[in-house]
Amino acid sequence: GENADSAAATTQEETPAADNSMVSPDAGKPASKGETLMAQNDCKTCHKEEMKVVGPALKDIAGKYPNTPENVDKLADKVIKGGAGNWGEVAMTPHPTVTKDDAKEMVSYILSLSGK
């Protein structure tokens, strides 16, 4: 068992494999509630932070909508109900299981990205 100590030291640093393609400079800070909720839902299927995929980039959404209570409320409804038209023909899928409060958390997080 001479190697027991060194083996223990290396395993402590290991974390589960993560998708690092979206890591930002401040990735070490705790995720906001909205960011955590987005990770638990299917948001990243169609949206990335920096680039358009199926839907607009999150930073583009933040650039289009000022972070106001009215916009948070309106976009939270959009998350839940889905719909198309604001960004062309691609429809956003409805997310009927997302609560209004959770949707607002996610929208607040997205709209906070504009100033970075």
Image (cartoon, rainbow, N blue to C red):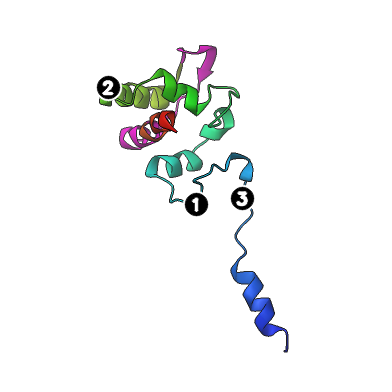
- Closer to the N terminus: mark 1 or mark 2? 1
Please tell me which residue lies in front, 61 or 81. Answer: 61
Amino acid carrying label 1: it is: Gly
Q: Is the residue 20 above or below the residue 86 in the image?
A: below
Residue 42's x, y, as percent?
Answer: 53, 35
Cα distance in 3D space between marks 3 and 1: 13 Å
Q: SS of the residue at dot 1?
A: loop
Q: Which residue is mark 1?
A: 28
Bounds of the magenta segment: 84-107
Of 82 and 57, nearer the camera is 57
Taking the magenta stretch, the answer to whether it contains residue 101 is yes
Whichever of callouts 3 and 2 sits on the residue coming sooner in the sequence is 3
Quadrant holding the C terminus: top left
In the depicted structure, whether residue 31 falls above or below residue 99: below
Query: Which residue, given by chain and number where applicable, does mark 3 sit on?
Result: 18
In percent of width and height, residue 69 lies at 26, 26
Which residue corresponds to mark 2?
A: 70
Left or right of 62 on screen, residue 15: right
Q: What residue sits 58% from the left and 39% below the top?
A: 22
Crowd band around label 3 with a 10 angstrom C-alpha radius: few (<14), some (14–19), many (20+): few
Q: Residue 111: x and y, percent? A: 39, 29
Dot 1 and dot 2 residues touching (CB under 8 Å)? no
Q: What secondary structure is marked by label 3? A: loop
- Which three-letter amino acid code belongs to the residue tagged 2? Glu
Outermost residue on the left side: it is: 69
Q: Residue at x 27, y 22 (%)?
A: 70
Amino acid carrying mark 3 in the image: Ala
Residue that appears at 57% across and 27% down: 46
